[in-house]
Image (spheres, rainbow, N blue to C red):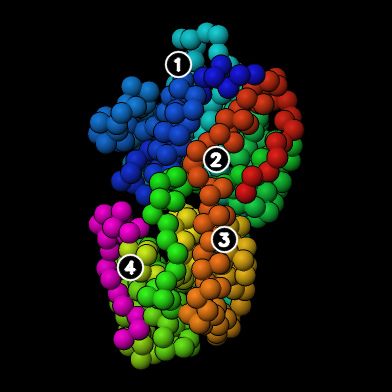
Amino acid sequence: MDALNIRLFLIAPNVSVQMGGEAIKALQIFEQLHGLLGDVTQITHGRNRNELRKHALVADIDFVEDDWIDVFMWRSVVLRAFMTLRFSFRAVRRAEALASMRDGKHVIIHQTEPNSPVATRWTSSHFQNVFGPINGNIYYPQSFRKFESVSARIRRLLHFPLQILNRLFWRGLQKADLILAAGGERTIKSLRALGVPCERVYETLDCGIPSSLSEVAHTPSPKSLGRFIHFGRLVFHKGTALAIEAVAKARPSVTLDIVGRGPELAHCKSLAKKLNVEDRVRFLDWYENRDDLISSFENYSGIVLPSIEDANGIVIQESMAVGLVPVCLDWGGPQLLIDNGVSGYLVAPKTVDEITAEIAKCLNCLAEDLEMTKAMSARARQRASDWEWTKLAKDWVNCYAKLAARPKATAMSPPSITR
């Protein structure tokens, strides 16, 4: 079926540049798919209205407002856990109502959020259902589980029991005509526990990156050699402290700029002082304009982000696109993005001492050999070129077209895997 004969409804509770990464991603998905298909309606919660009313595509955005049931559920506290399902139910019903107003096109309802494989969702019984990118089943590595919060430990221990319960009593994702899975084997394992047929799962990326990043790409120079950056919200699982300890073990010419704010800031400053690397580790607060942050990348040869719980790794995608060589843990999203020793380095998530010592070796290698660093930078940029939103969105549209050629709830033969 011609993709242009598809009427697409996208559903996400938050679609915004002000509400964090998942909301930004939902907005980017809408913009990219609208540019390719044209007939795309985004359904989102009314709390996004004030921001989106100035958006160029506002005419194709539909809002679900809270009713008295939503207010009651929120105030009850106990029922808040079911509000995502409630929104899914109302948004699907809204999509069905809007779809009935137009004839002649094949209707697909694609819920882009939530991205958890455990979250329950409503499905349409009239039109084909697509979910994703689903990306989850990510928890701390074994050696870090002593640092888990109580809530994180509960989520980890209950993950597969919840999937079994969902399989028995709530068949949301199982009814999907197509699931876009972005977390590799860990997410597919969770979907299998839920009873999702593997032929309806298509492996893809969690997020794309703007094509414009390639325009500001740079090649490491003698001036940037040995200089590294770590940026993002300073929280425990981002591994900022691990990066600082690694610098302390690396050769004296290795330096690190930490760009970000968060609850770990005071601890990290204290750690840098304790390890006597205050002259090599700088804390640069935050760039209010993201373009300024991206422009600063030319001052560095690599990024150090030893995160222990990042399901995706948009930071790594963006950094590689502009030529920074990444040094990360072989865990979560980064391990799906980096070819170890080719486009960056992946360090096994063992003990803190082993991790920091291995990261230090990687930093030393990058700081000592400019030609090798240039080669890895070029391979990082080449790898990132496959992640541009324009390519990812076309891949999904191809999935829609193949899906539309099949009856609802009929198993779909997966296209070639893109990762």
Name the residue tied to disc 2: 392
Among numbered discs 4 and 1, the one appearing first in the sequence? 1
In which quarter of the view is residue 380 placed? bottom right
Among numbered discs 4 and 2, the one appearing first in the sequence? 4
**Total numbered badges shown on the rendered structure:** 4
For discs 1 and 2, the disc positioned in front in the rendered view = 2
Q: CA distance from mark 3 to mark 2?
A: 19 Å
The answer to whether one can see residue 209 in this image is yes
In the rendering, at what x and y percent does residue 273 appear?
32, 88
Q: Residue at x 61, y 19 (%)?
A: 2
For discs 1 and 3, the disc positioned in front in the rendered view = 3
Q: What amino acid type should be assigned to the residue bearing mark 3?
A: Arg
Q: What amino acid type should be assigned to the residue bearing mark 1?
A: Leu
Q: Residue at x 30, y 36 (%)?
A: 47
For discs 4 and 1, the disc positioned in front in the rendered view = 4
Residue 143 lies in the magenta-colored region: no
Among numbered discs 1 and 2, the one appearing first in the sequence? 1
The answer to whether one can see residue 328 in this image is no
Name the residue tied to disc 4: 259
Name the residue tied to disc 3: 379
Magenta stretch: give its range. 279-295
User: Which of these two is toward me, 382 or 48?
Assistant: 382
Residue 293 lies in the magenta-colored region: yes
Q: Element under label 1?
A: helix
Q: What amino acid type should be assigned to the residue bearing mark 2?
A: Leu
Q: CA distance from mark 4 to mark 2?
A: 29 Å
